[in-house]
Amino acid sequence: MDENNRLTVKQLSATDASDIELLLKEVWPTAVEYPNSWREMRTINTEQIVNEMNNGFIYFGIKANRRIVGFYKVFIAESICVGEHQSVHSFYRNRGLGKAMYKHFIEFAEKIWSKRIYVNILPTHAASVKLVETFGFKKIGEFEQISGMLVHVYEKEIGKFDDQKK
């Protein structure tokens, strides 16, 4: 958030990895709606974050008081974008960070000419379900991401573009 309390989502880099790790250590251990094994898998360390960045994941985040208070990551495959791992510090929940990040995700996908974007949402996360539906995502399926954890797959069609980019 900038000095005017506006939510500004910016691309993060490897120099932000330790701050991302700190946020994950604060967020995921208390995310009891997820199985413990999933929470442990999502609490990745600095080295793993940098490795993901070097292997195609693009991290975007929101900072407040010089620290990352929310982030998500995107993986691009051909003409689709997959958004995942959205995490928001508990102190900053219900302040519009999730909404700002979804808006940014859609704008990012449009900018790179993606045709579709996807996210997986726990069906019990009413706020997340409402958010994706507000942004025009449609539920297209469901699957068990890990044993005992059902997720709903949401898709948003960005547009039909020919192969030439502007």
Image (cartoon, rainbow, N blue to C red):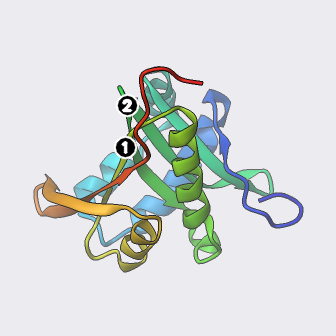
- Residue type of the residue flagged with mark 2: Ser
The residue beneath circle 2 is 79
Name the image quarter holding the C terminus: top right
Q: In this view, does 149 lie to the left or right of 91?
A: left
Position of 24 relative to 134 (above/below): above
Crowd class of label 2 (few under 14; some 14 to 19; many from 20; radius 10 Å):
few
Position of 77 relative to 92 (above/below): above
Residue at screen point 13% across, 56% down: 143
Crowd class of label 1 (few under 14; some 14 to 19; many from 20; radius 10 Å):
some
Q: Is residue 113 left or right of residue 124?
A: right
Position of 47 relative to 3 (above/below): above
The residue beneath circle 1 is 116
Circle 1: element type: strand
Residue 152 seen in this snapshot = no
- Residue type of the residue flagged with mark 1: Arg
Give residue 15's quadrant in the image.
Answer: top right
Residue 92 seen in this snapshot = yes
Name the image quarter holding the N terminus: bottom right
x then y, percent, for residue 96: 62, 71
x then y, percent, for residue 121: 31, 62
Would you say the residues marked 1 and 2 are in contact, meaning their CB atoms lie under 8 Å apart?
Answer: yes
Mark on residue 10?
none
